[in-house]
Image: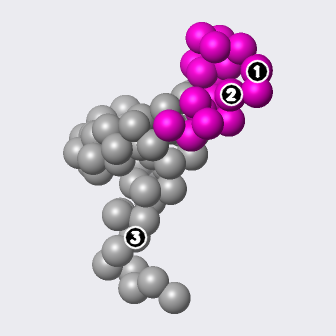
Amino acid sequence: MIPARHAPLLFGAILSGLMSLLVSGIATARASGLGADYLGLWMSSWLAAWAVAFPVVLVVAPLTRRIVARLVDDA
């Protein structure tokens, strides 16, 4: 099991990985179609997107949590 202190890092890795996988898959399909080279193009696009998304999520997630905390009622 992974120690709890690594939870924010793991959260960021999973969230950014799944979201960039989904978005890059849709964008690749729209840009190039679902041809024989689709999977290779998608994986290449996904790795590039994840390389950007992962650090961005790590920076943006705490800010987003603070904004949400201000917007919701504590009661």
SS of the residue at dot 3? helix
* Alpha carbons under labels 2 and 1: distance apart: 5 Å
Find residue 65 and report its image quarter.
Answer: top left
SS of the residue at dot 1? loop
| Crowding near the residue tagged with mark 2, few <14, some 14–19, many ≥20 C-alpha atoms within 10 Å | some
The mark found on residue 7 in the picture is 3
Q: Which amino acid does label 2 sit on?
A: Tyr
Horizontal relation, residue 10 to residue 35: left or right = left
The mark found on residue 38 in the picture is 2
Residue 19 seen from this side: yes
Q: Mark 1 points at which residue?
A: 35
Query: Residue 53, position in %: x, y?
Result: 36, 39
Q: Are marks 2 and 1 in contact (CB under 8 Å)?
A: yes
Residue extent of the magenta highlight:
25-44
Q: Which residue is drawn at the image coordinates 45% and 83% (left, top)?
A: 2
Query: Residue 5, position in %: x, y?
Result: 32, 78
Q: Is residue 30 magenta?
A: yes
Q: Which residue is drawn at the image coordinates 57% and 46% (left, top)?
A: 18
Query: Residue 39, position in %: x, y?
Result: 68, 35
With respect to residue 15, does 28 lie above or below? above
